[in-house]
Amino acid sequence: MTDANGKLQILFEVPTPLGFSVRCTRRYWNFIVTEKHPSLKHKLKQVIQTLQHPEEIRRSKSDPGVFLFYSGHQKKWLCAVSKNDQGMGFLITAYLTEAIKSGERVWVKSK
């Protein structure tokens, strides 16, 4: 979807503790919550908060430009996955999980 000027409708763009911002279009968010992870339909604010104020961030084992942002607790974590492409990030997906994946820990929230 584009606006009247032909630009993509950005649903959100937020800074992360890693120094780059992550953005997501309205259309892509709708794809995530309808096609991939319907359990996140009403969790947009939590995904944004996870990107801005995660408990920890891990680097993907398969792609060094992909980061997994985690918030929550040991029984249920929210994971927001983003790609940093030359300083501009975009949301790849988000999901609920019971465990943090084993990638390189690159950032941890200070106590």
Image (tube, rainbow, N blue to C red):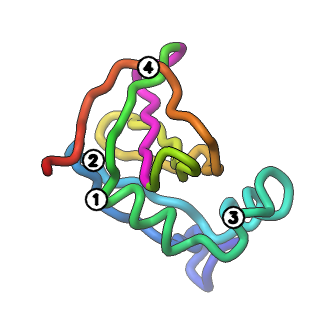
Q: Earlier in the sequence, mark 1 or mark 3?
A: 1
* CA distance for labels 4 and 2: 19 Å
* CA distance for labels 4 and 1: 22 Å
Q: Residues within 10 Å of mark 4 (few under 14, many from 20)?
A: some
The residue that disc 3 covers is: 40
Q: Do the residues labelled 3 and 2 touch (CB within 8 Å)?
A: no
Task: Give the residue type that dot 1 points to.
Answer: Pro
- Which of the two residues, 75 or 30, is positioned nearer the viewer here? 75
Q: What element carries label 1?
A: strand
* CA distance for labels 1 and 3: 21 Å
* CA distance for labels 3 and 2: 24 Å
Q: Nearer the viewer, mark 1 or mark 3?
A: 3
Residue 29 location, quadrant:
bottom right
* CA distance for labels 2 and 1: 6 Å
- The residues colored magenta run 62-71
The residue that disc 4 covers is: 103
Residue 9 image point, x, y percent = 58, 73
- Which of the two residues, 89 or 105, is positioned nearer the viewer here? 105
Q: What element carries label 3?
A: helix
Say the numbered circle drawn on residue 97: none
The residue that disc 2 covers is: 20
The residue that disc 1 covers is: 15
* CA distance for labels 4 and 3: 23 Å
Q: How crowded is mark 2: few (under 14 residues within 10 Å), some or many (20 or more)?
A: some
Q: Is residue 48 above or below residue 65?
A: below
- Which of the two residues, 67 or 111, is positioned nearer the viewer here? 111
